[in-house]
Amino acid sequence: MKNTYFNLFRRAFALVAFTFLITSQGKAQGLFTFSLTSDSTVTGIPGATLNCYGLIENNSADTVSLWIIREENNIPTGWASAICTDVCLPPYIDSSLLYLYPMTSQSYTQYFYCGLGQNDTGHVVMKFINTGDSANVQTQRFYAYADSTFLSIPENGRELSPSHLFPNPAKRGTAVYHDNQQGIIDNIELFHIQGSVQKLEFSFNTIYLPGNLSSGLYFYRIHYSDKSAALGRLSIIQ
């Protein structure tokens, strides 16, 4: 109940602040755009904090005021999601008011707090609404997947530290390098926790990452020429 009152108070305060702004400076007539700066889907292991990123821009000649509203919060029990712009809000608050001056921008972060020990999925639906122009509205879905399926080590294998592939995190469409002290690579597979598997091209100690990979956490399995295997984790960023 306390959290409910706090949420209502914050909304009322934001409305009062907005009223003050439009009466002191004139009605906000600017237009905004929202774009993703990461993938809308993020992956990780149970217990992790997973983030998606976006950018809100006002490229018009006037100020813009917009509501950011979490319309749907479809997450499993034990999970939480949160909104972060100029202020990072606690999970129980589902809206925020943002004010952007002409030719300025604000980063947006969508947080997912995954429950410990849970292999599950969740998603939220965010709506960005221009308070001065009802036609200037954007809706964005964000998805999170948490799964420990690929954390198991092959029966004849070992687990590698993140430094055995470097750089790690790595950008998609680039190359990463393997510590050859582990052995000579026979083949390497990349696992996404949503279930997809693909073999990676490599040359000696250089491994090539496809350009179509989504951002998030992956697991890779290296098979060596001596028939041993090893499992590691690789983070892909945009």
Image (spheres, rainbow, N blue to C red):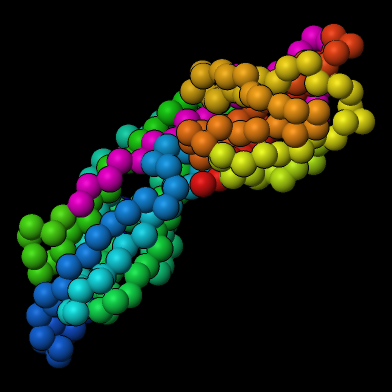
Q: Residue 156 vs residue 234: left or right?
A: right
Q: Quadrant of residue 28?
A: bottom left
Residue 49 picture location, percent across and down = 54, 44
Q: Is residue 47 left or right of residue 214?
A: right
Query: Which residue lies most toward the front here?
Result: 203
Residue located at (81% from left, 21% from top): 185
Residue name at image x 70 percent, y 43 percent: 168
In this figure, what is the number of numbered marks? 0
Q: Magenta region: which residues? A: 138-161
In terms of image quadrants, where is residue 160?
A: top right
Q: Is residue 164 above or below residue 17?
A: above
The front one of 35 and 22 is: 35
- Residue 196 pos. (x, y %): 51, 19
In the depicted structure, whether residue 105 falls above or below residue 165: below
* Vertical placement of residue 228 versus 84, above or below: above
The answer to whether residue 11 shows anywhere in this view is: no
Q: Residue at x 10, y 69 (%)?
A: 132
Residue 38 lies in the magenta stretch: no
Residue plotted at (17% across, 59% down):
129
Residue 92 vertical position relative to residue 86 in the rendered view, above or below: above
> Residue 95: percent from the left, percent from the top?
27, 58
Q: Position of residue 20 (x, y in %)?
A: 17, 84
Q: Quadrant of residue 54?
A: bottom left
